[in-house]
Image (cartoon, rainbow, N blue to C red):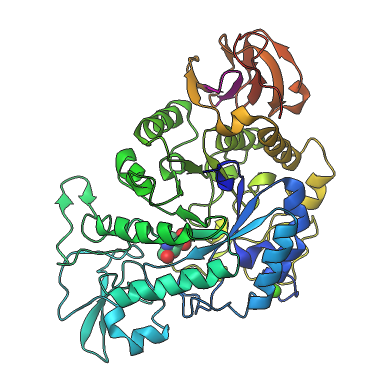
Amino acid sequence: MSKPWWRDAVLYQVYPRSFADGNGDGIGDLAGAAERLEYLEWLGVDAIWLNPIHPSPNVDWGYDVTDYTGIHPDLGTLDDLDRLIAEGASRGIRILLDLVPNHSSDGHPWFRERPDFYVWSEEIPNNWESIFGGGPAWTLDEERGRYYLHNFAPEQPDLNWWNPEVRAEFERILRFWFDRDVAGFRIDVAHAIVKDRELRDDPVIPGLGMRRRYSMFRPETHEILREWRALAETYDPPRLLLGEAYSLEAEQWAGYFGERDDQLDLAFAFMLTHAALDADEMRGVVSEIEAALPAHAWPCWAGSNHDIGRLATRWAKGDESRARCALLILLGLRGTPCLYYGDELALEAGAVPADRVLDCATPSRDPGRTPMPWTAGGDWLDPWLPLSDTSRNVEDQRVDSGSTLHFTRDLIGLRRQLPALRSGTYTEIPTSAGAWAWRRGADVAVAVNLADAPVELDDVSGAILLATNRSRDGELVESLALAPGEGAIVATSQRSSGSSAASE
Ligand code: NOJ
Ligand code: CA
């Protein structure tokens, strides 16, 4: 079988309400996203993942779906999506949607008409807690006098995946979108779709809190992923399944790819996302992941998303050079990187005053969801979430070849040019404390200094292909010296005898 397209790809997450507003109502939409395809093509990304675009009362901003085959009127129409897919295809950009199979909205007609699609109990049957709020994951439905399960908000009742008709409905939903040339799905809560049939108590481990053994992580979830993978592979090209698959440790996570490469194609490696921007910690996580993954498995790296916030703030604390190091890591590791809109600008978390907070979760995730700053003037009219800081914006950075935007674009370009950077093996290079360096294939090295003191890497010599400090591009080094918060990709071929890093 030929290599699937996504192994070489750079993905880009678009939070639709905040990316680009096509009709000036302050809400980003599909038409706005289509207008920005030119930008995304220039940047060099291969696919965009759109957070949920379906009709929703927006208790959890689209993650509470009332119609899985419709489009939210704020975002546009099916025609707009068809146009986005077609125009994307003409620019080499595929479109991924977000599938929310764990729960629907309580406003979905199923909730009234098909109670058998949900999980019910006469009494609160166990100690399961809602992820939003920490109270019981069970709420009394006054009309029915019974409790229903919601692992998330009360307005997000969990679907009953023991019911074959639920499975059949989702198969229909997948086919509906695959038939419209949607390239695949990011799957929400891919680790928890099926619940324990007997609704047993989650174990409480002293000191560790509650372990979600029965409310999540059930082995039966793998069956569902297997069915979807088989379905996705009946299409040409096979549709991509990218899981939001959390896990308690690397081996469990590796299980989502299936022993026989028959489940997820890609899964977010959240162990890295949640690590600190610290050499020891990240090196440790990556070596654990590398060791746990079966040969066919392929991780997806992300430093930001609509839940966790922005890497430029979270990891880099506003320091642009460290944000560039983060980008070097995401794009330099073995796997598929997924940028979050704005990562390419080193965009920081937005300021959202308490009276503008719209998120249902605490702490609010809104600072990571503020509108994309396209210009310094901010070209949003009365945006749904405030756009307070436009100092890092597309227009200014696009005309500045020293900007982080150009850095990201050049990094994506380098990945495209160098097969080793896309598919070469990952091998650690010994470094002094605070630095992290690895080889990709035989003769490309990636190195970052995440410490507060300078380092010198004796085992990295050659020609700098791309550095966070752009004035160093092209420099020849005998041993790579990196200032605090500096990083580089180095062609080491002069020193090594193996194959060359020559471009394709
Ligand atoms: C994960 C999504 O990324 C998050 O935004 C959402 O709130 C929960 N799943 C529930 O759907
Ligand atoms: Ca709009």
Q: Main secondary structure of the magenta part?
A: strand
Q: Is residue 440 magenta?
A: yes
Residue for point 65% across, 71% down:
81
Q: Quadrant of ligand 1?
A: bottom left
Q: Viewer-proximal residue, 467 or 134?
A: 467
Q: Viewer-proximal residue, 369 or 23?
A: 23
Q: Does residue 474 sit above or below 359 in this rendering?
A: above
Task: State which region is magenta.
Answer: 437-449
Q: Does residue 182 sit above or below 441 in this rendering?
A: below
User: Could you tell me residue 282's position as x and y percent?
Assistant: 45, 31
Residue for point 52% across, 55% down:
238
User: Could you tell me residue 63's position as x and y percent?
Assistant: 46, 69
User: Could you tell me residue 280's position as x and y percent?
Assistant: 43, 26
Q: Does residue 113 sit above or below 104 in this rendering?
A: below
Q: Is residue 397 left or right of residue 200?
A: right
Q: Is residue 65 left or right of residue 103?
A: right
Q: Is residue 195 left or right of residue 102?
A: left
